[in-house]
Image (cartoon, coloured by chain):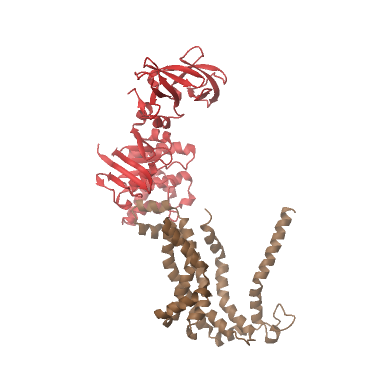
Chain colours: A red, B brown
Amino acid sequence: MTIQIELTGVNKHYGAFHALKNIDLSIEKGTFVALVGPSGCGKSTLLRSLAGLEKITAGEMKIAGDLMTNVPPRKRDVAMVFQSYALYPHMTVEDNLTYSLRIRGIKKAEARKAAAEVAATTGLSQLLGRYPRELSGGQRQRVAMSRAIIRNPKAFLFDEPLSNLDAALRVHMRKEIRALHDRLGATSVYVTHDQIEAMTMADHVVVMRDGVIEQQGQPLELYDSPANRFVAGFIGSPAMNFIPATVNADGLSLTVNLGTLEQNLQINQPLPPGRHVTAGIRPEHFRLTSADEGTFRVPVAVVESTGSATYVTTLTDPELTLVETGRSMIRAGETIGLSINPDQVHVFDAGTGTRLARE
Amino acid sequence: MTESFHNRLMFVIAILLAIVYLFPLYWMYITALKSGSEMFATPPSFWPSVPEWGVYAEVWQSRNMGRYLWNSMVIATGAVVLISVLGTGCAYVLARYRNVWVDIGLFLVLMLQVLPASLMITPIFVGFSQFGLLETPRLAVILAIAAKSMPFFIVLVRATFMSVPMELEEAALVDGNSRVGAFFHIVLPLARNGILVSAILIFMQAFGEFVYSKSLIQAIELQPASVGLNSFMGPNTNEWNKIMAYATIYVTPILAIFVLLQRRIVSGLTSGALK
């Protein structure tokens, strides 16, 4: 596999604000990479730097082997889909699609032919004569995508393209974008704040916070072994439970502190006794049992049912969120038992939040 | 007080205010058509008994109005072209870049608008005469008007540019255009309405400009209609019907343009504000 996009030591300053800190990232040709993180984490800045819309302060940026650090956007041969779609309001759909071709001096007839071909694959054939204001949100989104496709660029850059669509359409477009990526064999970089989008669409997920890459890897890798407490809390929904704990004298179990009650929790790898840690357990990894079974006993505060799953919130400090698939007999006010597989307990340093133990 | 009564009261007040505002215009139109004795009759008549339509042709001929209006036209067109070309670029920069220097620039631009023409005319006159600009007095007036009206144009057009999303320009850049190309292909067409409206307003202002023209243009054959109207009036004037006919010929085309375009002008003026 060849490397299509390569960033080494990329930094970006806005005055005193350090937006990107030493970003190293290589993206193989044909992969779908998601940049994910809370707002202000630098993911959009990184994408805009790739497009050339922001000038990086230090570091190197290569696209398809060519150094791009000081190349203006028009010479980078990348296509970008904006959050607002940024369709040219004074041009018809066809003119929007062919704009980039016409700038490059391609003959009108040829550009129109290319537009017709792309429109046929994205279902816009009937709409070529319309203006953007006459289209629905989903159709505009398709035009924005088609405008990127028509150029056959070296990389596709997506800046939260689905955030203006309603929930149902978003799920649908997610699949459509991914299918398109596979069909074109393209290299895509996709910015989103929605970890589900990142997990479901991408081959490779990059989690960012405060201008730093916290962790990158395949989606399930991030889910199974998050490198720190931030990634652990960011990936997965509902979010992971974090409980303050201390390593017991045997080194193989923790005393977890749930406010009024303290419980013992087995872990699968020895840790130095007495160390203060944070135990992380995903809501879906608790097994709910009756009160006399299980390793934990906790009182129930709230039970919410969606039909397909039941969400249980406990009356502890910190409160825990538990998920059980299907329906549940549990009622608020009851005490229930929980059992946990030691392999599914994540342990983080109480101070730095980095992952301890377990490969 | 009920809602509908309140609305009706407001409507009546609005009508009364409109009457007060428009009365001079009405008086201009009817006085032009009155005969000599009717003009000075007490109580005044509010409708001419025998309208004298011939007054227009007579005034046009005797005062050589064609020449005056041509000069007004030259000055207004020159000022609009100069302001549009220089002001559009300036407004774009002020709309797109945000830093201390831009803020200072904007403040200075707004300050220029506060200074009245009658205050500025003396330094302008002295400066222009030293540069020899008074040899070409119409050009001098064009420059003076451009300097005076530019801030107004910049402020309006800047608002228009700010309503064009930055992302459209960025999309054009990524699509393969240069910064200049993106400006001409994307931003300018989208800001066209606002620029046109501002240019029309400037044109109407410049068409009626008086202080600079009166002071800088000595030669009668180069004076615009506003100065011509002024020279028509003297301390012993009694030809009010002719003066009003002159004013009618001068002002009606501008009024007609405004009435025809008023919907666009109003929407152009508010387009930057709403969004």
Identify the residue at horizontal 71%, vertical 77% (top origin). Answer: B46
Can you name the residue that lies furthest to the top here?
A292
Q: Position of residue B223 (x, y in %)?
A: 50, 82
Classify residue A255 as left or right of residue B39: left
Is residue A247 visible in this depiction of the protein?
yes
Identify the residue at horizontal 63%, vertical 74% (top origin). Answer: B25
Q: Quadrant of the C terminus of chain A?
A: top left
Quadrant of the rendered structure where residue A172 is?
Answer: top left
Question: As rendered, which of A313 and B245 lies closer to the eye?
Answer: A313
Q: Position of residue A277 (x, y in %)?
A: 40, 24
Q: Quadrant of the N terminus of chain A?
A: top left
Question: As rendered, which of A170 and B46 lies closer to the eye?
Answer: B46
Q: Position of residue B89 (x, y in %)?
A: 41, 63
Question: As rendered, which of A76 and A174 lies closer to the eye?
Answer: A76
Quadrant of the rendered structure where residue A64 is?
Answer: top left
Question: As rendered, which of B134 and B82 lies closer to the eye?
Answer: B134
In the rendered view, would you say A198 is above or below B208?
above
